[in-house]
Image: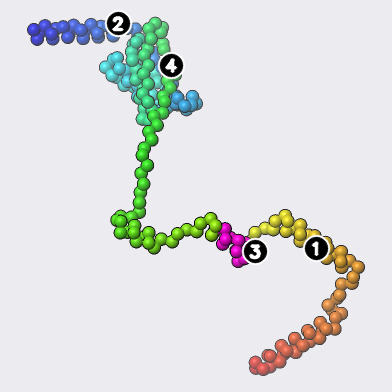
Amino acid sequence: MKRLLVVICLLFSVSAFAQKADRPLVQFTGVIYNADSTKITVPYVTITNESFGKTATVANYKGYFSFVAHEQDTLRFTSVGYDAQIIVIPKNVNKNYSVQVFLKPDIINLPTFKVFPWATTDEFRKDFISMKLADDDLEVARKNLSKGSLAEMSKTLARSADEIQSATAQSMHTSILNSHSLTPNPLLNPVAWGTLINQITAGDKSRQSGN
């Protein structure tokens, strides 16, 4: 009985192999693309012939492949990060069969993983107690609008259009007020000369007292 079963299995195997051998050969070619964009090819995709001993072929770096298969062979396209794609070569393709294969990206959402810088709860408790809380928005706005902050910012920030317009108007107003008056010359002012002489004299006296 066992010998009969072995003979039957061998007959089925030989029959299946003969059917595969009888199927015409086909030059199977194509290009593999990303399903999200037809301009992006997927390189080095593994192509497994599920119908012929699971022989494998690898596409090149541009996603192009070309190899010999049989009609009605089942080809499985696999690549890391993409869902597998199955293509069956139809009958009567006249020895050449070209396809465009589109692989859909396999997106896996991993759970959130948090890393804490404390090795123990005691370290966390110590850092938490000594932690300085950051200022809230109201406190930050109060510091930015203080007189000291505004004075320091005015030294480096450029004047606004309103400030420039006010300064220009003030300058024009002063010029109009002084247009009909004589501008005093400090060289003709006797008070200025007297102040200068007193300063020179005081400077000589201080040097003499220093000696």
The disc label shown at residue 99, or none = 4
Q: CA distance from mark 4 to mark 2?
A: 23 Å
View extreme (front): residue: 138
Q: Earlier in the sequence, mark 3 or mark 4?
A: 4
Is the residue marked by circle 1 packed among few (<14), some (14-19), or many (20+) residues within 10 Å?
A: few
Tell me where residue 76 appears, x and y as whole percent.
Answer: 34, 20
Helix, strand or loop for disc 4: strand
Residue drawn 39% across the image and 29% down it: 106
Is the residue marked by circle 4 packed among few (<14), some (14-19), or many (20+) residues within 10 Å?
A: few
> Does residue 181 appear to the left or right of 51 in the view shown?
right
Q: CA distance from mark 4 to mark 1?
A: 80 Å
Of the residues shown, which amino acid type is indicated by label 2? Asp
For mark 2, what is the residue? 22
In magenta, the rendered stretch is 140-154
Nearest to viewer (mark 4 / mark 1): 1
Of the residues shown, which amino acid type is indicated by label 4? Val
Residue drawn 32% across the image and 20% down it: 48
Nearest to viewer (mark 2 / mark 1): 1
Residue drawn 72% across the image and 58% down it: 163
Is residue 86 visible to us here?
yes
User: Overall secondary structure of the magenta stretch?
Assistant: helix
Q: Quadrant of the N terminus?
A: top left
For mark 1, what is the residue? 171
> Does residue 6 appear to the left or right of 172 in the view shown?
left
The disc label shown at residue 155, or none = 3
Helix, strand or loop for disc 2: helix
